[in-house]
Amino acid sequence: MLSMKIRSHSESHLVELDDGSKWQIFPGDLDVTLNWKPTTELKLVRIYDPVSSHALVSRNDNSTVRVLPVGDKWPVDQVRTVLKDNQ
């Protein structure tokens, strides 16, 4: 699978990859991105999750964050449930 690097990660909840795609990071996964650097290699994978259809996986440490394309809306009720269950 093709790996991509981060082009821009100026806002904690948004990431742009070097292929030009832009993704919103799931609020409950933001802490995972703190270790990401411009050299971090990421792969986009399809997932089956109540809040997201895709995830970015770091090839460096195999960490995973759920993402949606920029412009899509998070399913509010499912997000609340996931965040509440993870406390």
Image (cartoon, rainbow, N blue to C red):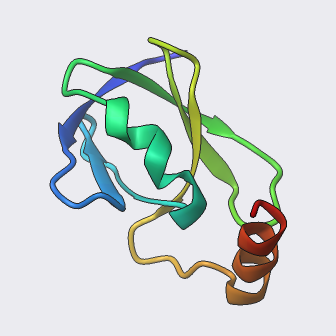
- Reply above or below: 22 against 44: below
Task: Specify the quadrant that holds the C terminus.
Answer: bottom right
Percent position of residue 20, x then y: 24, 45
Report the front residue among 19 and 9. Answer: 9
Q: State the residue lying farthest toward the bottom.
A: 77
Q: Position of residue 5 (x, y in %)?
A: 28, 26
Relative depth, front residue between 48 and 78: 78
- Image quarter where the N terminus lies is top right
Instruction: Name the side, left or right, on which 83 lies relative to 27.
Output: right
Which quarter of the picture shows residue 41? top left
Direction from residue 23 to residue 15 in the image, left or right: left
Image coordinates of residue 81 in percent, x first then y, are: 82, 77
The part of the image, by quadrant, that contains residue 33 is: top left
> Could you tell me which residue is drawn at 70 percent across and 76 percent down?
79
Using the image as rendered, state which of residue 58 and residue 31 is in the foreground.
Answer: 31
Q: Is residue 29 left or right of residue 71?
A: right
Q: Is residue 39 shown above or below 65?
A: above
